Image (cartoon, helix red, strand yellow):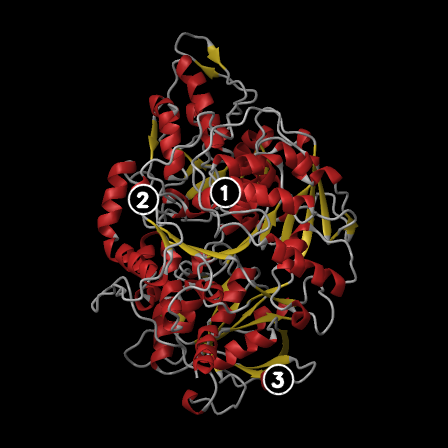
Amino acid sequence: MRQNTIAPRVLARTARGSHVSVQRRSLATPASLPEKDCTSITPPYSKLQQNLATIRKLLGNRPLTLAEKILYSHVYEPERTLANGGIKRGETYLQLSPERVAMQDASAQMALLQFMSAGMSRCAVPASIHCDHLIQAAEGAEKDLQRSIVTNQEVFDFLESAARKYGIEFWKPGSGIIHQIVLENYAAPGMLMLGTDSHTPNAGGLGMLAIGVGGADAVDALTGTPWELKAPKIIGVHLTGQMNGWTTPKDLILHVAGKLTVRGGTGAILEYFGPGVFNQSCTGLATVANMGAEVGATTSTFPYTPRMRAYLQATGRAPVALAADKAAANGYLAPDEGAEYDELIQIDLSKLEPTINGPFTPDLATPLSKFGSFVKEQGWKDELSAALIGSCTNSSYEDMTSVADLARQAKKAGLKTQVPFLCTPGSEQIRATIERDQVTSELEDVGATVLANACGPCIGQWKREDKQGEENAILTSFNRNFKSRNDGNRLTMNFLASPTVVTAMAFSGKLSFNPMTDSIPLPSGESFRFSPPHGQDLPEAGFTPGETSYYPKPTPEPQPETEVVIRPDSQRLEILQPFPSHFGEDSGNNRGLELPPLKVLMRVRGKCTTDHISAAGPWLKYKGHLTNISENLLITAVNDEGGEVNVAFDHEHGPSESESDTIPSVAKRLKARKQPWALVVDDNYGEGSAREHAALQPRFYGCAAIVARSFARIHETNLKKQGILPLWFVDKADYNRIGSGDVIETLGLADLLQGKADASIRLRVTRSSGEQFEIPVRHTMSADQLKWLRAGSALNHIRAQISAGAN
């Protein structure tokens, strides 16, 4: 049961003061970077407000939340979209026009391979590629960066050549983490952008809607195809009071995750408002937005504040700030008074305390004051094996100067960290600035190793030599802590906390250490206690860009003569072949517009994230090669029939084949027999990252349907994009009635595809014994999504539309 105060359809108590054009900071203004050309990054506020005015009339001029204003102002052809009535949150599908796309190097490979097959000569919207996921942490920044460039040169050459051909900004290895770079360079209040990473919502720290998607969704925006999203519900988070002591924005989102759980935000936008928002830095709000992904939220956002304006000015985007000021004065960048939320959470920041979440799930929240007792109750060793700060969640200037304050205190007392202490700057701009301001040296003086400006250990790019196969605990300021995620060891317990709590505990080496109340004994016999840390959100001397050779030329023109580099014998990259349709003469399906009979590959037990479906770590090198990466399909998933990991049963195996084998091996057998198949899965299937490989890989091996107790939002969309039909059990108990080797057949899908009103789908299940029964299922397919299914994939449908338009 949720412990927070929630009421359905509660009226928001918004403050008129949230129109920040009348609020000015009294603090001295930090120095700024040289002003950038902001033409391509300033939202078209006049057009958006005109669009919103049209929507308002169609909705009867009711008060709107901020999220609704931003979302609805980006609706494609409002009159057509709302032709059948108003917008009902949680039900109406919206056709949207995003303004920008950002892609990280791992997911960009498949996104670009799909975009290339669409036949376009340039991108329809501005786009960027960021090389951050393929850099492995091992020895330190310089050596790690150089080694990773050599190891991944083939992929980087492909990405850079594709960027040049299609006019995409290419951020080289070493430039930083995608989300920090987007916040520093592209994010703008009121914008709608897509990113091929689940933590894209980080940019919401600048009062916009930034949504994580799979590569096929990105292709919609890149080709100018309206992007479809079911109108999210809006969860309001009303903030009052002011944080004090050790409490940080990270603790706010860790607290919210504990209340909402990993499913509580699914299908919803988290909209924070109230006086407590205005006390937070822009990068602090980005941390909160970043981890909204861990509760399944579509994205998170905040009203425009003076500190957002200050951040825009400090990062060379004063023209964006000026335009945003004008839009805010018109009420565009704050919720209307009286706007209604589907749920309302009340949080008094003055009562919030530091929180630690984990292990193995980001929603198991424990207040710091109770964490030592929690460790003791669980019977865990009271020791820390490593402390890691940084990643896209907490690698800002404010984060780094806060932990440097603790490092100075510790150094003065003669202390050094007791465990490996790894620090990841968020970008080259942050790295250069903290180096100039002696933050880096202060961290290194107490034992820190500063890593490359990349994702590193947060996503499993950590060449860890110790503790393999041993139960151990690490403390990190990361955002996700699933089993095996960080170092490949399923026994490593990752506890999530603020950078300052992680840093303080690194000097103790004990999980039970509470820096708010506990002291560390000194060799002199005295004891030392930390004072609450203080940081700066913006550097007084301004940001310095650092090594500018990592940066792209702004708004490059496409160079169509460029040859995209893919070696014919490559084991890293592979040209995509279109998936065939499940229907029609060439499909071998004699059931018309029903799916062919599907063999159930397995029933997946319990938590099955996209990490389980398509593991990262060493598999990242195959992100552009579907054949090779498919070898990791579901290799850490648990088979509910027997409870084993990576085991599937082949009920029709030949004399030379075993009765059971690995999951990808049995899937390949079914593909070789031209036997389409299905999966039966548990609740929140596909939670976690946005990786579309978790949909591409089963489709590649012949999966046509997945029947779930429930789906995570991004993954369900990715399945639809690749031509896999996601179905929901009406009665969740039916999950236990279908087993491996059973055959399922859709009944009623043909009616749905033919547009019959109120069409419903059932499944006829035939057990190996010959017993048959039917169960009801439900779907969330829109009219356009049904076209994707019929065509075999969304890309097949887009390609056909482009071809028809050319003719």
Which badge, 1 or 2, is on the more N-terminal residue? 1
Residue at 46% x, 38% y is 316
Q: Which residue is label 2 attached to?
A: 550
Mark 2: give few (<14), some (14-19) or many (20+) Cα within 10 Å: some
| Residue type of the residue flagged with mark 1 | Pro
Frontmost residue, 183 versus 139: 183
* Badge 3 amino acid: Gly
Q: Which residue is mark 3?
A: 748
Q: Is residue 356 above or below residue 532?
A: below
Give the residue at mark 1. 359
Where residue 765 sits: x, y (%)? Answer: 56, 81
Residue 664 occupies quadrant: bottom left
**Secondary structure type for disc 1:** loop
Amino acid type indicated by mark 2: Tyr
- State which mark lies toward you, 1 or 2: 2
- Residue at 35%, 74% (x, y): give it: 668
Where is residue 358? Give x, y as percent: 52, 42
Q: Are marks 3 and 2 in contact (CB under 8 Å)?
A: no
